[in-house]
Image (cartoon, grey):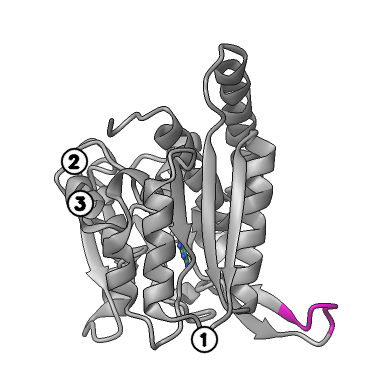
Amino acid sequence: MTLIDGKATAAAIKAQIAEEVKEIVTNGGKQPHLAAILVGHDGGSETYVKNKVLACEQCGFKSTLIRYESNVTEEELLACVDKLNRDEDVDGFIVQLPLPTHIDEQKVIMAIDYKKDVDGFHPINVGRMSIGLPCFISATPLGILTLLKHYAVQTSGKKCVVLGRSNIVGKPMAQLMMQKQYGDATVTVCHSHSAHLKEECREADIIIAAIGRPGFVTADMVKEGAVVVDVGTTRVADPSRKSGFRLSGDVDFEAVAPKCSYITPVPGGVGPMTICSLMKNTLSAGKKEFYQ
Ligand code: GUN
């Protein structure tokens, strides 16, 4: 069993990005600039955004954090998006999700200029991704592809089960694993209403679990020699920790790991790669790689 080290892989990629940024700036080019909008004080979102700002520093990017209280109006938020769309210094920006329920998340995503949508959530980027055109690809699926490639995991022709159908992970992951230029695998998507979920998993060469249910994937669901990628990051109470919680993946790691050829841990697997992929997308935005 090989433990996939997302933390080390992400650090190596961020170091490469930092080298490239140094070269760009030395040659008189512009320092890439990522802006992030954070609404409210959700613990998970606070941590993600803090880590994104930190990653910008590690990559030599400029970063701007814009904060709103959770009672911000949709109008105020849309005005901020519009301002960032028009700010020539900002190469890319994200609106950290989830947003408070009185704000229409899809409306906010649609308002982002797709050329600055480094999260890859705008329908133009989602559509381009689904037909294999150059675009910003959602950071978690892109991070998983990068990780599998880094560890030379064979995906072509393999049977891949994606657990979960979210717009951020499950759907784009399934699309990418299916496409010839990325995963080139045979893909099955399972979700909360799938009738034969366990059986589907048992036949899978690769399982990508993104359902947000701690320990959902048990040893009886995993074939000997399978590759298991755990996207889950649910906070569960842990009084022994200073923070009072620990992150729990979707996979029962202790029981599943001995059966795997490769497995990602939580934390230290997919999480660091997600942030690293956002950095890749920001560099692409700075270089106007996909759009003028
Ligand atoms: N919330 C959870 N994951 C993400 C992400 O990748 N981007 C944004 N903007 N919000 C998130």
Write down the residue under mark 3. 124
* Residue 5 visible at all: no
Q: Are marks 1 and 3 in contact (CB under 8 Å)?
A: no
Does 112 sit left or right of 286 as displayed?
A: left
Q: CA distance from mark 1 to mark 2?
A: 39 Å
Q: Tell me which segment is drawn in magenta.
A: 240-245
* Viewer-proximal residue among 137 and 141: 137
Q: Nearer the viewer, mark 1 or mark 2?
A: 1
Which residue appears at 34% of the width and 29% of the height? 289
Badge 1 marks a residue whose secondary structure is: loop
Q: Quadrant of the C terminus?
A: top left
* Residue 241 visible at all: yes
Give the residue type at disc 1. Answer: Asn
Which residue appears at 42% of the width and 55% of the height? 83
Badge 3 marks a residue whose secondary structure is: helix
x, y percent for residue 218: 48, 77
Q: Is residue 289 above or below residue 101?
A: above
Give the residue type at disc 3. Answer: Ile
Q: Nearer the viewer, mark 3 or mark 2?
A: 3
Write down the residue under mark 2. 132
Q: Is residue 80 above or below residue 252?
A: above
Which residue appears at 55% of the width and 51% of the height? 275
Going from N to C along the chain, the mark reached first, 3 or 2, is: 3
The picture quadrant where one finds residue 100 is: bottom left
Write down the residue under mark 1. 71
